Amino acid sequence: MIDYNFIVLARLEYQERIRKIEEELLARQQMERLPSTSDRLLFAVGEWLEHAGAQLKAQHQPAIQPTYHGSHAR
């Protein structure tokens, strides 16, 4: 007779190894999606530059001058 317990145990061990490998791959994929420290730093510097530029632009915005006077436009 064939000992089916051995086959069942081998199949369960195989499935457990597959499950662990899938978990490790999923964890690696999730870690790769997170931005690195340098990416976060560059993003923060970019936001700061945009904010500083907007403030400078608002401070030094020239007054709007009309291009013509009254109805004498030509």
Image (tube, rainbow, N blue to C red):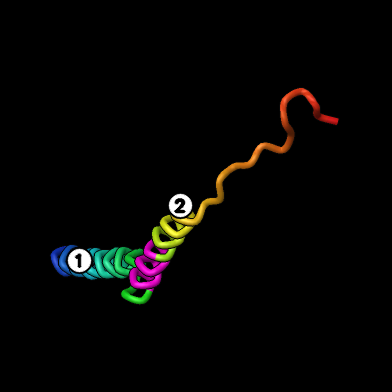
Farthest residue, direction top: 71
Q: Residue 32's spot in the image, x, y percent?
A: 35, 69
Q: Which mark is residue 32?
A: none
Q: Main SS of the magenta segment? A: helix
Boundaries of the magenta span = 39-48
Q: To which residue does mark 2 refer?
A: 58
Q: Residues within 10 Å of mark 2 (few under 14, many from 20)?
A: few
In the image, 30 versus 36, the foreground residue is 36
Residue 73 versus residue 12 in the image, above or below? above
Type of amino acid at the residue the image marks with label 2? Ala
Say which of 69 and 64 sits in front: 69
Image x and y of residue 2, in percent: 20, 66
Element assignment for label 2: helix
Q: Residue at x 34, y 69 (%)?
A: 40
Q: Is residue 40 left or right of residue 1?
A: right
Instruction: Write the residue at 22% across / 68% down.
Output: 20
| Residue 40 among magenta residues | yes
Quarter holding the N terminus is bottom left
Which residue is at 31% across, 63% downward? Answer: 30
Disc sitting over residue 16 in the figure: 1
Secondary structure of residue under mark 1: helix
* The stretch drawn in magenta includes residue 18: no
Q: Quadrant of residue 49?
A: bottom left
Give the mark toward the camera: 2 or 1. 2
Where's residue 60, x and y in %? Answer: 49, 56
| Place of residue 36 in the rendered image (x, y in percent of width and height, measured from the top left) | 34, 73
Q: Quadrant of the C terminus?
A: top right
Q: Are marks 2 and 1 in contact (CB under 8 Å)?
A: no
